Amino acid sequence: MLSEGVPYGKLYFIKEKIGLSEGDLQALDPYREIFVQRKDQFAQHFYDVFENIPETHLILEHEGRPGFLKKAWAAWFEFFFRTRLDDTLLAYLWRIGVRHVEVNLDQRFSNLGFSVIRQFCYDIVLSEIPRDQAAPLLNILNKMLDLCLLIETEAYITHTTRCDLEVMKEVADRVRNPVTVIGGNIRRLQKKLDATSKEYDLLGRLFVENQRLERMMQDIRVYMEVFAGEPRVRKVDLDELIGLVLEKLRAEDPAARNGVNVNVNLDRRARFVTGDADGLQLLFYYLLQNSFEAVAPDTGFIEISSRLEDGTTRNMRVEIVNTGAPLETQEMERLFAPFYSTKVTGTGFGLAIAQVLARKHYGKIDLEPVSEGGMRVTVTLPRAERNGDE
Ligand code: HEM
């Protein structure tokens, strides 16, 4: 079906940003036929341009249905000049973009294609339309072609990144199953051995590495999901959310975490954030997990506070300061890179996931060392319009 899988929301957003209006379309009405009459000439010209480029020449030479492309391009040109801006047009443009991804057309050739179309239309306007009417008409044509180009780009980005993400997710899922089986068997073998033997110890070390691999596969999956997902934005109470995250983290490792002193002190004007509750929970989960891992289990201290960003009421900052060994500034820059970890058992994905989540919320994360040792993490997030008891 034509409309299946078309992200109308995004496409209407693009259309709105370009500012193409009904008035523009009406202004185009008297000239539509001038362009439509040139559809075959356009298709031939387009074909000639791409026949002269070695890479695209190959595509045209091996066309599965000879003559189809010239017809498709002529039909596109006619549709483009007859259309009203509705769902049918958006779905049509989206489908062309998807088709181009399927046939592996390099995005640079699509860009070049729209440049060729723009030039072709300019030539018609300049040779056939009275001078005083040309400028507004060119302006409308530019907006229409920009719409096509942006939809094509959107389809390209969506489908190519989706392919990469799906492959990565699939790899993570397929590796996870054997890794779990290996872990189970290591445990079974250990039970048959004397707990003081060298072999027992060796298997124990294998088990720890295996667990790290298992966690890494899980984190890669989460990273991919977060990367591809769209936040479902609403007003979120950070106080409640951080409480839940702390509870979860402590339950995961009570021995190491229950003794850590955590102080939560949120400014009442910076307590509610605009964001996706699940995404924000994950973001603070990974940041606080990092802090718990940095502090000493019995004497460690974590302070969580929030305040309005200086000079604006639109954003708020949440600071997490933890005690612990200081980190080198150089090391801090690499901490956000996937697979980079300073811990022996780390997967290197926690901060990378947190960073993607912050960006999805139009926010950011900054890290800095604390002079007495430890680290300060500052998360900037969009503040909910009505905060607390304002
Ligand atoms: C940039 C402007 C372009 C437009 C507006 C455009 C338009 C179209 C249209 C309408 C279709 C048919 C889609 C369908 O109904 O399934 C199509 C498919 C295709 N286009 Fe383009 N195209 C453009 C650029 C290019 C370029 C530069 C090439 C390479 C030389 C190209 C190669 C193809 C191929 C190989 C197909 C698939 C043909 C098939 O299904 O057999 N396109 N394009």
Image (cartoon, helix red, strand yellow):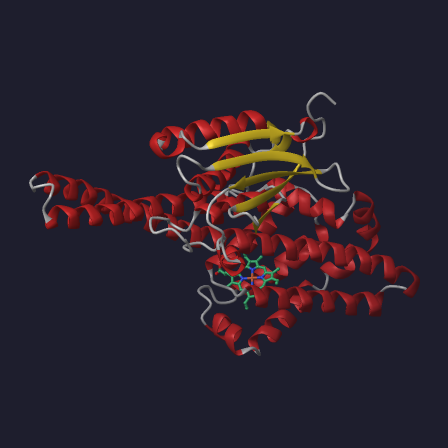
Q: What residue do we see at 65% from left, 72% from top?
A: 45
Q: Is 9 placed left or right of 37 in the picture?
A: left
Residue 118 image-quadrant placement = bottom right
The total of numbered circles placed on residues is 0
Rendered residue at 59%/56% (across/down): 153
Pick the front one: 13 or 311: 311
Residue found farthest to the right: 132
> Residue shown at 47%/41% (left/top)?
291
Question: Would residue 226 be found to the left or right of residue 176 on screen?
Answer: right
Viewer-side residue, 229 vs 204: 204
Q: Position of residue 317 (x, y in %)?
A: 64, 39
Residue 219 image point, x, y percent = 39, 45
Quadrant containing ligand 1 = bottom right
- Residue drawn at (44%, 44%), measured in percent from left and top? 294
Question: Which residue is the extreme one toward the top?
Answer: 389
Q: Nearer the viewer, residue 56 or 243?
A: 243
Is there any visible trace of residue 317 in the rendered image?
yes
Residue 186 location in percent, x, y? 16, 44
* Residue 84 visible to the viewer: no
